[in-house]
Image (tube, rainbow, N blue to C red):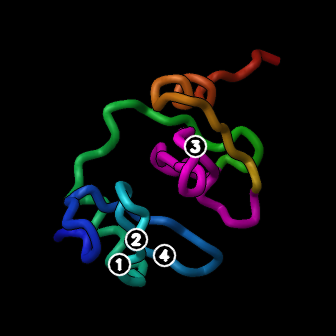
Amino acid sequence: MRCKKCGSKNLGIVTSGPHNKLVCEDCLAFQKFLSSKDVETFRQLNNPLPEVLKPCPFCGNEASKPLIFHHSEGVSAEWWEIQCNDYRCSCCQSRSTKEEVVKAWNTREEL
């Protein structure tokens, strides 16, 4: 499957409230809504991340894949973000590189 807007094969699942959406991870274009069964099938067919992400440190739910964000037109800055997949939890980490955000997300203070 390819992105309808840019043709990329780099698609991912974003959970927003009770909805699961398939989006392009390159241009962030919405593709379609997914059922729970579709989400499970998509995850089984796609390779897992090479890096292992720990669960959310606050609620214990699964983390999103690292996503890249760009500032508005005319600004060249970009950043990577990982967030909790539970829409009720606001936990997230942002850094300038994918490697930094994965390391920051997985860093836990020993209690």
Within the magenta stretch, is there residue 83?
yes
In what element is the residue under mark 2? Answer: loop
Q: Which residue is mark 2?
A: 29
Dot 4: few (<14), some (14–19), or many (≥20) neighbours within 10 Å?
A: some
Q: Residue at 77% x, 44% y: name it.
A: 58
Q: Which amino acid, mark 3?
A: Glu
The earlier-in-sequence mark between 2 and 4 is 4
Q: Position of residue 98 (x, y in %)?
A: 46, 31
Main SS class of the magenta portion in the image: loop
The reply to whether callout 1 and callout 2 are in contact (CB within 8 Å) is yes
Q: Which residue is mark 1?
A: 31
> Mark 4 or mark 3, which is nearer to you?
3
Q: Which residues are magenta?
A: 61-89
The earlier-in-sequence mark between 2 and 3 is 2
Q: Residue at 59% x, 58% y: name it.
A: 85
> Mark 1 or mark 2, which is nearer to you?
2
Per the model, the C-alpha gap separating discs 1 and 2 is: 6 Å
Q: Which residue is mark 3?
A: 81
